[in-house]
Every structure is written in C-alpha cells, then in structure tokens.
C-alpha cells in the first residue's frame, strides 16, 4: 500500500505543484518556456518512469499509469481555464500511452531475463 501512495504523491507534485511553482516563481515569457519544457520533456519522462515501475508487477500495479495523466489534467485545469483542458487531453493520452509502452517493455524484459537464467 505504501508504493501507490508514494507514486500518487510524486505524480501530484510533478503534474500539479511544479507548474504552480513555475507560475509563481518565473515571470514573463520564460514561464511559458518552463511550462513547455514540462509538457514536452519532464512529464513524458516521468510517465515512462512510472510505467517502468508498474512493469515490475503489471497485474497489481497497472493503475499507477493513470496517476500522471489524471493529475496532469487536474493541474492544467487549475493552472489555465477548464475549457483548455480539452486541448491538453491529447497530451494526457500520450502520457498514458508512453507509460503503458514502458510498462509492457519493462515486463517483457523482466520475463525474458527470468527465462534466460539457468
């Protein structure tokens, strides 16, 4: 039970708190540069990391993949207007797909590694 709470807290921090910190600490147009770097660099990497972790036990941890996209949409809804959430919905789907791909690859590597052991 400890792991899901940890990943939910980290997802909430990365997807909700970081954009709010950037908004309050960074002024001007550099704020948008920071948000774009979150959307295009940090968030996909984080979703893949969550997927790799969920690949350790797919049957028990598959729902961890839902945390980054849902918290991302919540953070965008709080940061911008709720009508702009639909614009960012495709990014949430992309984060879900990246996490799922990382989970499947991680599970396949683990399974293949176990088969190779004598």
Image: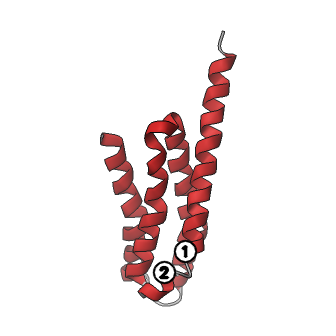
- Compared to residue 112, the image places residue 19 above or below, namely below
Does the residue at mark 2 contact the one at mark 1 (Cβ under 8 Å)?
Answer: yes
On the image, the x and y values in percent for residue 63 come to 45, 49
Q: Secondary structure at mark 2?
A: helix
Q: Residue at x 54, y 48 (%)?
A: 51
Q: In which quadrant is the N terminus drawn?
A: top left
Who is closer to the viewer here, 58 or 78?
Answer: 58
Quadrant in which residue 89 is drawn: bottom right
Answer few, some or many: residues within 10 Å of disc 1's Cα (few below 14, many 20 plus, some between 14 and 19): some
Q: In which quadrant is the C terminus drawn?
A: top right
Q: Which residue is mark 2?
A: 85
Q: Which residue is mark 1?
A: 89
Can you see residue 77? Answer: yes
Q: Residue at x 52, y 77 (%)?
A: 35
Who is closer to the viewer here, 26 or 2?
Answer: 2
Q: Residue at x 36, y 46 (%)?
A: 4
Q: Residue at x 43, y 63 (%)?
A: 14
On the image, the x and y values in percent for residue 38 come to 53, 70
Q: Given the current orientation, which residue lies at the most extreme front position?
A: 59
- Compared to residue 117, the image places residue 83 above or below, namely below
Rendered image: mark on residue 4 = none
- Compared to residue 105, the image places residue 113 above or below, namely above
Query: Distance between the Cα atoms at labels 2 and 1?
Result: 6 Å
């Amino acid at each position: 039970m400890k792991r899901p709470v940890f990943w939910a807290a980290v997802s909430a921090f990365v997807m909700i708190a970081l954009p709010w910190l950037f908004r309050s600490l960074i002024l001007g147009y550099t704020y948008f540069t920071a948000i774009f770097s979150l959307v295009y660099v940090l968030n996909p990497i984080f979703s893949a990391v969550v997927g790799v972790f969920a690949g350790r036990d797919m049957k028990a941890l598959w729902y961890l993949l839902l945390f980054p996209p849902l918290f991302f949409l919540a953070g965008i809804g709080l940061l911008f207007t709720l009508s702009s959430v639909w614009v960012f919905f495709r990014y949430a789907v992309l984060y879900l797909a990246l996490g799922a791909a990382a989970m499947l690859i991680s599970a396949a590597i683990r399974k293949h590694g176990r088969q190779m052991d004598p």
